[in-house]
């Protein structure tokens, strides 16, 4: 899937084939994909840039069609103004941002470009979420900010998740997990209680990270 039609012709170039077989079966534009999504009756679209592959972290991105998610949001909204488009946000600051003020400024631009709702990166301290929403509202961001919650499945995640996703886990929760270690379900029960007790959490996105069975158990 590419933004422009030029890739359709590039994919047919002879140097992009091996043993008479083209390396790419088919190329469609973003707008063509948007049309297909609409024809399939899908109204809600989550527009994410995604993480930059490690081998491209130092690459020059100036010529990229979609350097940021806002570029994809604009394209989708232009292709179908009726789409309900979601975007990502980071209560503990996007890893590529210099500070939260700048981060929220860019988030406001993404919302103005067409985002109808936002879903946060995972967090483990409700106050961080509340403070982030307050800053968003102060910046003029009025769309729903849906909290993203990650149920813990192993005690090891208390050391892996902060490094992998640039977030903090409260000391109290860390100590509770360490005291239980293999009784991780009791920790998820606490997260579930926090979810129910939290204001402004009428909607919640559960982040499975490949562990959908954990989500099922938590929702039961």
Image (tube, helix red, strand yellow):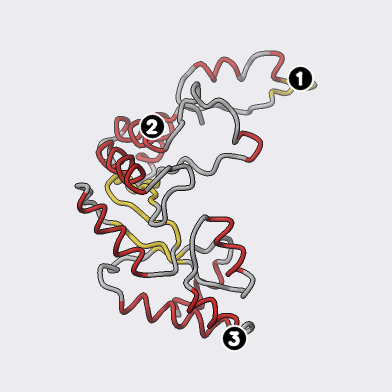
Cα separation between marks 1 and 2:
36 Å
Which dot, 1 or 2, sits closer to the camera? 2
In-image side of 125 versus 137 (left or right) = right
Quadrant for the C terminus in the image: bottom left
- Identify the residue at image location x=36%, y=75%: 195
Labelled disc at residue 180: 3
Lower position in the chain sequence, tag 1 or tag 3: 1
**Residue 55 falls in which quadrant of the image?**
top right
Label 2: element kind: helix
In this view, 103 is above or below 131: above
Cα separation between marks 1 and 3:
59 Å
Label 1: element kind: loop
In-image side of 48 versus 210 (left or right) = left
What residue is pinned by disc 1?
A: 20
Labelled disc at residue 158: none
- Identify the residue at image location x=39%, y=29%: 31
Labelled disc at residue 71: 2
């Amino acid at each position: 899937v590419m933004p422009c039609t030029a890739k359709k012709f590039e994919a047919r170039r002879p140097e992009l084939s091996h043993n008479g077989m083209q390396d790419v079966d088919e190329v469609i534009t973003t707008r063509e994909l948007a049309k297909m999504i609409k024809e399939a009756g899908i109204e809600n679209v989550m527009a994410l840039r995604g993480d930059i592959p490690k081998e491209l972290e130092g690459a020059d991105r100036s010529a990229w069609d979609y350097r940021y998610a806002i570029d994809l949001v604009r394209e989708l909204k232009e292709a179908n103004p009726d789409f309900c488009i979601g975007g990502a946000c980071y209560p503990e600051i996007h890893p590529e941002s210099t500070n939260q003020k700048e981060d929220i400024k860019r988030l406001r631009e993404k919302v103005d470009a067409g985002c109808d709702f936002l879903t946060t990166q995972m967090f483990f301290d409700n106050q961080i979420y509340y403070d982030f929403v307050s800053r968003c509202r102060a910046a003029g961001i009025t769309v729903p900010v849906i909290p993203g919650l990650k149920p813990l499945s192993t005690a090891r995640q208390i050391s892996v998740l902060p490094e992998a996703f640039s977030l903090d886990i409260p000391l109290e929760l860390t100590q509770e997990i360490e005291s239980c270690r293999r009784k991780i379900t009791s920790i998820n029960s606490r997260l579930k209680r926090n979810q129910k007790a939290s204001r402004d959490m009428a909607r919640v996105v559960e982040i499975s990270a490949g562990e959908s069975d954990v989500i099922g158990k938590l929702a039961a």
